[in-house]
Image: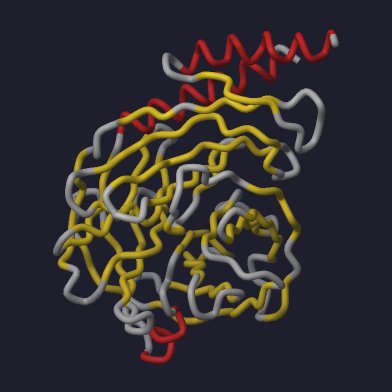
Amino acid sequence: MKNTVKKIAGFAMAFTLLGTGTVVTKTISPESDNTIVASAITSIGTGSQIGQISNKNGGIQGMGMYNNVFYFVTQKNNSNCKLYRMNMNGNTSEISLSKSDSQLIGHGNDLCVAKCNGKLCLFVVDGQNNKNILLKYELNSAQTKATLAAKYQLDKNVSAVTLVNPDGNNNLKFIFRNERNIFTAEIGRNESSGKKKTTNSGNIQLERGAAVSQGICYYKDLLIVPYTDSNYKYNYIQVYRMNSNLKIDGYLLDSFKIGKNSKFEIESIDYSNGNNWYYNTNENGYCRLYLNTSLGNAINRIVEARYYEMSRR
């Protein structure tokens, strides 16, 4: 009983750090008898637009960042895919793909970026057709061309992907999502194509009705999960806690609502320099990228609360 009281007291202070509107809603026990869940919905603005392109070549899908540059996929009919890069000034250029690679990417539902032996690489999941395939593309030094470097066959279907360690020399640690299920896998930075086993990392809630599967992002022991309502107008960005073994430990820490009265579908989310958070959207006629400082500030308050709770143990 003493341990339970201590944990609840610690989280009460953590919730204070999060700000108003965060409440304990229920008690569950995915890994221990001491687990509690925090839940809130905080409506925030759409943020500041970084840039846009026309959606005449298809809607925007997966997006990832590296060194303040956005890399993203557009697709039309789940086959005619294009890769782009955009800088912070909104200047956009296409990254060339072969016709076969354009078809291989399929829907291109999510994308993440890593450095592999000095080369910048894009890792893409289809999410709709070849659901168990992770593609690795190497960019040339000018970042004008992408070449397929490896094709990994996973033992589970996935629709979203993020990286724990995009830099360094150690094996890449991937986190995948398929609907409510979270998986992880390690792949060598120079590893060739082949079959890869995944490890179950738990489940998320997606508790607000019909959901459209979008990209995910890992940040400082947190898993950031956006999804869109069935009207493609309002988006919920959920924040989950992961433990040191990359397991969802039962905590839904917060939820944020972002939307417009017209189509506004967040597809992927990523960060730069910690408190700068970005997402890409499909809107009427355009594919856009946004900076949302309100979201960044909120996520960093969660990180502060998380560190405070750990110090109290």
**Picture quadrant of residue 223:** top right
In the rendered image of this protein, does residue 144 appear above or below residue 71? below
Q: Nearer the viewer, residue 82 or 126?
A: 126
In the rendered image of this protein, does residue 269 appear above or below residue 150? above
Q: Residue furthest bottom?
A: 100
- x, y percent for residue 234: 31, 45
**Picture quadrant of residue 141:** bottom left
- x, y percent for residue 289: 26, 52
- x, y percent for residue 294: 32, 29
In the displayed structure image, the side of residue 283 where residue 81 appears, left or right: right
Residue ID at (59%, 76%): 133
**Picture quadrant of residue 158:** bottom right
Residue ID at (48%, 20%): 22
Residue ID at (68%, 70%): 156
In the rendered image of this protein, does residue 221 appear above or below residue 157? above
In the rendered image of this protein, does residue 71 appear above or below residue 247? below
Residue ID at (36%, 61%): 71
In the displayed structure image, the side of residue 239 where residue 192 appears, left or right: right
In the displayed structure image, the side of residue 169 where residue 298 appears, left or right: left
